[in-house]
Image (tube, rainbow, N blue to C red):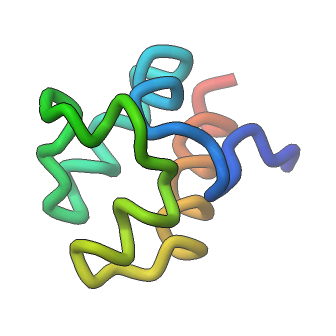
């Protein structure tokens, strides 16, 4: 399974490139895709601000992306 998303990537860029990732952001309670921070924050910063493990989020997002291939 190839890793497509990393925790250093911008949240909005991930959502735009991989729309299936939006379900994972919502699963973790990050409805921030429409907020201004999503344009500037990377996944790691966004996850930590909301109290989530960025590595777990990355794994879940990549699993969903790879499942759709």
Pick the front one: 22 or 49:
49
Q: Is residue 20 above or below residue 50?
A: above
How many numbered badges does the structure rendering display? 0
- Quadrant assignment for the C terminus: top right
Q: Residue at x 17, y 43 (%)?
A: 32
Horizontally, is 19 left or right of 23 in the view? right
Q: Position of residue 33 (x, y in %)?
A: 22, 33
Q: Residue 8: give x, y in percent of width and height.
A: 66, 53
> Measuring 67% from the left and 43% from the top, which residue is drawn there?
5
> Left of 60 or right of it: where is 46?
left
Residue 23 x, y percent position in the rendering: 27, 41
* Residue 7 position (above or below residue 34): below
Single out the residue that lies furthest toward the top. 16
Tell me which residue sits at (19%, 49%) in the image.
Answer: 26
Question: Which one is in front, 39 or 18?
Answer: 39
In the figure, is residue 18 to the left or right of 50? right
Residue ranking furthest to the right: 2
Look at 51% across and 65% down and name the residue there. 44
Q: In the rendered view, would you say 51 is above or below 1?
A: below
Q: In the rendered view, does 49 fall on the left or right side of 8?
A: left
Q: Closer to the camera, 43 or 61?
A: 43
Identify the image quadrant of residue 35. top left
Horizontal and vertical percent position of residue 11: 43, 39
């Amino acid at each position: 399974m190839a890793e497509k998303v990393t925790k250093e990537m911008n949240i909005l860029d991930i959502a735009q490139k991989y729309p299936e990732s939006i379900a994972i952001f919502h699963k973790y309670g990050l409805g921030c895709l429409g907020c201004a921070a999503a344009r500037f924050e990377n996944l790691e910063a966004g996850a930590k601000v909301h109290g989530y493990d960025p590595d777990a989020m990355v794994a879940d997002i990549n699993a969903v992306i790879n499942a759709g291939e």
